């Protein structure tokens, strides 16, 4: 009997302007590699997840609106069958406060402060800075502020707190405007490919405006320093040996050295459309993991 693989995705929604371009190709490639593959909505109560040998979390991009339900789903599925990535990793990676843990482990990251509703007055950076929720994706509710925009920034923080969210504050990494952001994708514990994209937070864009998550995407060959930092970040993540896939997003600091901006271990875009040569390799690894 052929192995069965579910690729967990989200139901199309009017307010989420996102399409998983990799999903149809990935379903076909996993099927060609010898397994029965099917895309399933993660929140579909009629799906029998235990019928699958592997449930691969792919584009569950609405989880940020249903974090408790999503992590509970991951726990349930992980108890029934093999879940990639594992539920413990999912729980850890849903909240960007993990950046503080990476920094404490000695991993160079973008300097990050956090502010809950009970923390009182927030100290804002002297220069340009970014505010976003610790639970979010696709630059949702993320804003970029100049030093003379503290009042607007505090209103942004108040909005996040009113929605029960923790605010994340970072200095704006200005080199991203020229050198961009790099995303290094790993599969089966090994580097697979990388892309470079442009800056998302352009000046004057409101924090609650729709944004293009991946502008000006192109293939990228990482430097030795970028690859070493990505591997260091992954080694510091809990459950590192069990990660089937991972994406490490890097930007340059003021000194030109790379810093970790995010560590994507749940539902990252893998940019297989930019690197089609990776598709059969990834499919083979998925089938191998299912077996």
Image (cartoon, rainbow, N blue to C red):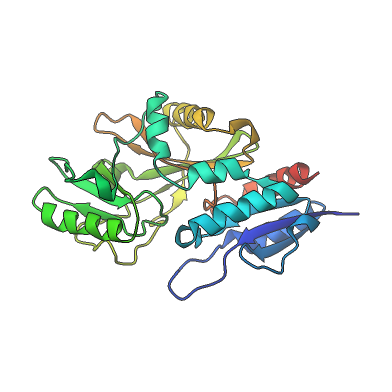
Q: Residue 107's spot in the image, x, y percent?
A: 40, 27
Residue projecting furthest to the left: 148
Please identify the quarter of the rendering in which residue 22 is found: bottom right
Which residue occupies the foreground of this view, 51 or 119?
Answer: 119
Q: x and y percent of residue 264 in the render?
A: 49, 45
Residue in front for this viewpoint, 193 or 68: 68
Name the residue at 43% across, 38% down.
Answer: 98
162 left or right of 248 in image? left
- Rendering coords of residue 28 (x, y %): 72, 60
Horizontally, is 93 left or right of 45 in the view?
A: left
Question: Dividing the image into 4 quarters, which one contains the N terminus?
Answer: bottom right
Q: Is residue 250 above or below residue 146?
A: above
Q: Is residue 273 visible?
A: no
User: Which residue, as the protein is rendered here, is positioned at the far top?
Assistant: 106
Q: Is residue 190 above or below residue 202?
A: above
Q: Is residue 237 above or below residue 246?
A: above
Residue beneath the point at 29% across and 57% down: 160
């Amino acid at each position: 009997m052929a192995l069965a693989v579910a690729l967990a995705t989200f139901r199309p929604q009017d307010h989420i302007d996102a399409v998983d371009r990799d999903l149809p190709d990935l379903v076909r490639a996993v099927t060609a590699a010898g397994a029965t593959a099917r895309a399933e909505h993660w929140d579909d109560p009629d799906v029998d997840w235990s019928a699958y040998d592997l449930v691969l979390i792919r584009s569950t991009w609405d989880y940020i609106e249903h974090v408790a339900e999503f992590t509970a789903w991951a726990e349930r599925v992980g108890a029934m069958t093999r879940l990639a990535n594992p539920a413990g990793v999912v729980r850890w990676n849903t909240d960007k406060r993990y950046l503080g843990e990476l920094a404490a482990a000695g991993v160079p990251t973008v300097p990050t402060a956090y502010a809950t509703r009970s923390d009182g007055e927030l100290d804002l950076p002297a220069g340009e800075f970014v505010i976003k929720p610790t639970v979010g994706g696709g630059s949702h509710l993320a804003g970029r502020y100049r030093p003379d925009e503290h009042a607007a920034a505090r209103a942004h923080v108040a909005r996040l707190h009113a929605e029960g969210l923790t605010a994340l504050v970072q200095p704006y990494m200005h080199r991203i405007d020229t050198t961009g952001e790099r995303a290094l994708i790993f599969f089966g514990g090994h580097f697979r490919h990388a892309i470079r994209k442009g800056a998302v937070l352009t000046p004057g864009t409101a924090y609650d405006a729709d944004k293009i998550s991946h502008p000006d995407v192109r293939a990228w060959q990482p430097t030795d320093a970028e690859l070493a930092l990505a591997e260091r970040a992954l080694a510091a993540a809990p459950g590192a040996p069990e990660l089937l896939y991972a994406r490490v997003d890097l930007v340059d600091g003021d000194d030109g050295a790379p810093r970790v901006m995010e560590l994507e271990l749940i539902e990252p875009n893998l940019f297989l459309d930019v690197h089609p040569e990776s598709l059969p390799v990834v499919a083979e690894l998925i089938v191998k993991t299912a077996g």
